[in-house]
Image (cartoon, rainbow, N blue to C red):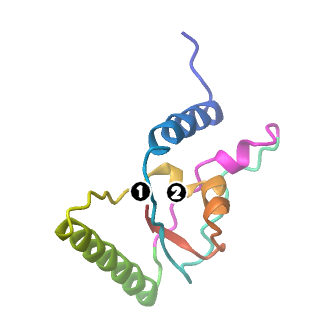
């Protein structure tokens, strides 16, 4: 079997998740603003016109005390929401992963450049 490239692998994974997630009735995406430029690309290659939107962007950690506190507060809020949903008998899942660090996902949810996606 042929090994697929990073772009093709990302697109394939996106299509697999699209099929799986199409049955989920709702999504909530939690973001924190003011977290520095979250869209710094690790590649400047333009040989694939769609490549950059599916490329996984590098992780940019909180770099100031304020950013760290805002990130921690967002995480605590997500956990409280999950506990509340559970108490009502609703299933939920806190997810992150490479998909939240792509331009395609960020564009889909309307992120600004300094928004950090904390959970999906």
x then y, percent, for residue 120? 43, 61
Corner quadrant of residue 9: top right
x then y, percent, for residue 38? 60, 68
x then y, percent, for residue 17? 49, 40
Quarter of the image that includes the N terminus: top right
Q: Does residue 89 appear to the left or right of 10 in the view shown? A: left
* Image vertical order of residue 88 relative to residue 74, above or below: above
Helix, strand or loop at label 2? It is helix
State yes or no: discs 2 and 1 in contact (Cβ < 8 Å): yes
The span shown in magenta is 47-61
Q: Mark 2 = which residue?
A: 100
Q: Mark 1 = which residue?
A: 96
**Mark 1 crowd level (few <14, some 14–19, many ≥20, 10 Å Cα):** few
**What's the magenta bit mostly, secondary-structure-wise?**
loop
| Magenta residue check for 22 | no
Corner quadrant of residue 113: bottom right
Q: Does residue 118 appear to the left or right of 44 in the view shown? A: left
**Mark 2 crowd level (few <14, some 14–19, many ≥20, 10 Å Cα):** many
* Alpha carbon distance from label 2 to label 1: 6 Å
Residue occupying the point 76% across, 50% down = 44
Helix, strand or loop at label 1? It is loop
Corner quadrant of residue 115: bottom right
Residue occupying the point 20% across, 62% down = 89
């Amino acid at each position: 079997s042929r090994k697929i490239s990073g772009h093709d692998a990302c697109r394939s994974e996106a299509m697999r998740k699209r099929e799986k997630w199409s049955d989920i009735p709702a999504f909530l995406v939690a973001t924190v603003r003011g977290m520095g430029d979250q869209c710094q690309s690790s590649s400047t290659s333009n040989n694939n016109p769609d490549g950059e939107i599916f490329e996984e962007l590098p992780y940019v950690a909180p770099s100031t005390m304020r950013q760290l506190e805002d990130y921690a507060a967002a995480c605590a809020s997500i956990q409280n929401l999950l506990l509340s949903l559970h108490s009502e008998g609703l299933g939920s899942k806190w997810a992150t992963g490479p998909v939240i660090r792509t331009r395609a996902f960020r564009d889909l949810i309307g992120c600004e450049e300094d928004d950090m996606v904390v959970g999906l």
